[in-house]
Image (spheres, rainbow, N blue to C red):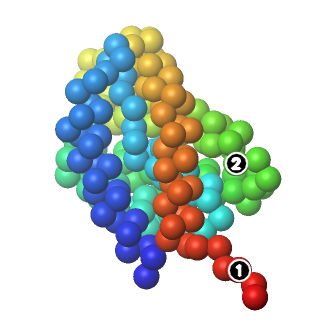
């Protein structure tokens, strides 16, 4: 039942990302709040259903963006897989795992979006995309990673309260 709160939050993040965050680029790169939220939720011990959230986000973003649908499925499922993998193997240090997941996921996201648009016939140059889109996006994602992790952690503590033994 607590997972039902996950979907309105994701919809709100999609709206915030498309209406506000995409209009504030650093060069041409922007932060991806959905990658940050999915990574932080997947790194949380109770985030076992991050897969469903990743599929939900990929479906919605496929309708919102001009990037092909398969790119978003690959990106967000990759974020979910990597965050759950890091949760199982680096559970004792979630901040380092978060930084690593966000860094790798941001690079993969930029690369997959570039490849998908290139296959569709876009005339983008790889060096230009790396310099003006991927590197600024990675920087912005790393900048927002810790505040988003704090929000996710607070929400998880609210949704899944710690049981006290009496």
Front-lying residue, 113 or 82: 82
Looking at the picture, does residue 143 appear above or below residue 123?
Answer: below
The residue depicted at 51 percent of the width and 40 percent of the height is: 147
Looking at the picture, does residue 45 appear above or below residue 2?
Answer: above
Question: Where's residue 21, x and y in %?
Answer: 29, 33
Marking on residue 164: 1
Question: Where's residue 74, x and y in %?
Answer: 44, 50
**Mark earlier in primary sequence (1, 2):** 2
**Could you tell whether 146 is left or right of 128 in the image?**
right
Residue bearing mark 2: 94
User: Is residue 132 something that shows in the picture?
Assistant: yes
The residue depicted at 37 percent of the width and 22 percent of the height is: 29
**Could you tell whether 9 is left or right of 60 in the image?**
right
Question: Where's residue 15, x and y in %?
Answer: 23, 47
Question: Where's residue 51, x and y in %?
Answer: 49, 64
Q: Nearer the viewer, mark 1 or mark 2?
A: 1
């Amino acid at each position: 039942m607590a997972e039902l709160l996950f979907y309105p939050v994701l919809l709100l993040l999609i709206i915030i990302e498309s209406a506000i965050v995409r209009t504030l680029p650093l060069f041409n790169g922007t932060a991806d709040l959905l990658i940050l939220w999915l990574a932080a939720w997947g790194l949380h011990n109770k985030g076992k259903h991050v897969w469903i959230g990743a599929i939900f986000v990929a479906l919605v973003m496929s309708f919102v963006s001009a990037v092909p649908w398969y790119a978003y499925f690959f990106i967000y499922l990759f974020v979910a897989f990597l965050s759950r993998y890091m949760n199982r193997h680096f559970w004792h240090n979630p901040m380092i795992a978060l930084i690593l997941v966000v860094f790798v996921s941001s690079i993969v996201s930029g690369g997959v979006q570039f490849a998908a648009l290139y296959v569709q016939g876009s005339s983008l140059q790889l060096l230009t995309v790396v310099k003006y889109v991927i590197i600024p996006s990675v920087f912005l994602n790393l900048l927002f990673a810790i505040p988003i992790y704090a929000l996710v952690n607070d929400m998880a503590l609210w949704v899944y309260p710690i049981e006290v033994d009496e």
